[in-house]
Image: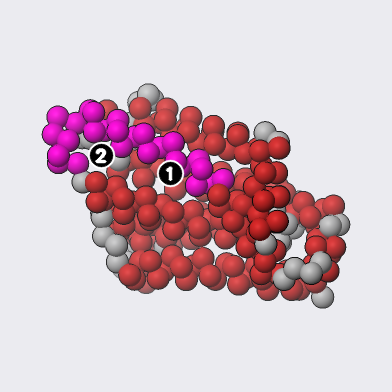
Amino acid sequence: MFAILKKEFFSFFSSILGILVILVFLIVSGLTLWVFDTPYNIYNVAYADLTLFFELVPWVFLFLIPGICMKSFSEEQRQGTLELLLTKPVSINQLIFGKYLGALALSIIAIIPTLIYILSIYNLSKTPENIDFGAIVASYFGLFLLIKVYTAIGIFSSTLSHNQLVAFIVAVVICLFVYYGFYALSSSGIFGVDIFIFEYLSLKFHYKSMMRGVLDTRDIFYFLSMWLFFMILTQWRLKTLKI
């Protein structure tokens, strides 16, 4: 598994993809939060916290993570090397986790430079002692769990087609639906009344709960359940390809 992880991780940086993903994320988030006149601009709210950053990041990663993951198994299928990998003395789970952890590591590396935003709001605030660092820590933890689910979705989607573009589009659609689709269904009024179960099924509902600084075991369990669901789907899909 570690050999696959190492291969996947360094393959991102042997091409422009890894550096491009990190740069795109940092440039988009940085310009949106600090430069452009957008609803996410921190200066516009005149309050020194990172709530707007944590509201923005899921939408940015909704496209970037599928872009990272789209070649994981799609490229193997296109080149005809997936069958060879499946006959190697490595289990399907080791293969999945190797590719999964390689993609996850790149996303986490992209987030690390944003820790400087904490220092930025600390220096901007007239009362730094009022900054809710507990909520910031909980929000980063929630973001980590969100990235775990997005990456699992991206890896699963890459098993569905040998075409990377198709895998990318499928991953974006699934991520969008799981993050916001259920939430939108609940608040749309299409059923006449708000249906809480739809809202509860959305990643956004549980992620926003963590953004408030609340680390509820029910939210953590939900994220882990969604992650496990798509990992199991990936395992099932590879088993069907192996037959």
Viewer-nearest residue: 194 or 152: 152
The quadrant of the image that shows the C terminus is bottom right
Q: Is residue 196 visible?
A: no
228 left or right, relative to 167: left
- Amino acid carrying label 1: it is Val
163 left or right, relative to 129: right
Residue drawn at x 77%, y 51% as measured from the top left: 75
Viewer-nearest residue: 9 or 230: 9
Q: CA distance from mark 1 to mark 2?
A: 15 Å
- x and y percentages locating residue 169 in the rendered image: 64, 50
Residue drawn at x 59%, y 56% as measured from the top left: 101
Classify residue 234 by image quadrant: bottom right
Q: Is residue 38 above or below residue 107?
A: above
| Magenta portion: prevailing SS class | helix
Quickly name the residue at label 1: 57
**Residue 173 covered by magenta stretch:** no
How dense is the environment of label 1, judged by Cα within 10 Å: few (below 14), some, or many (20 and up)?
A: some
| Earlier sequence position, callout 1 versus callout 2 | 2
Q: Residue 49 has which mark? A: 2
Viewer-nearest residue: 48 or 123: 123
Q: Which residues are magenta?
A: 106-131
Classify residue 218 by image quadrant: bottom left
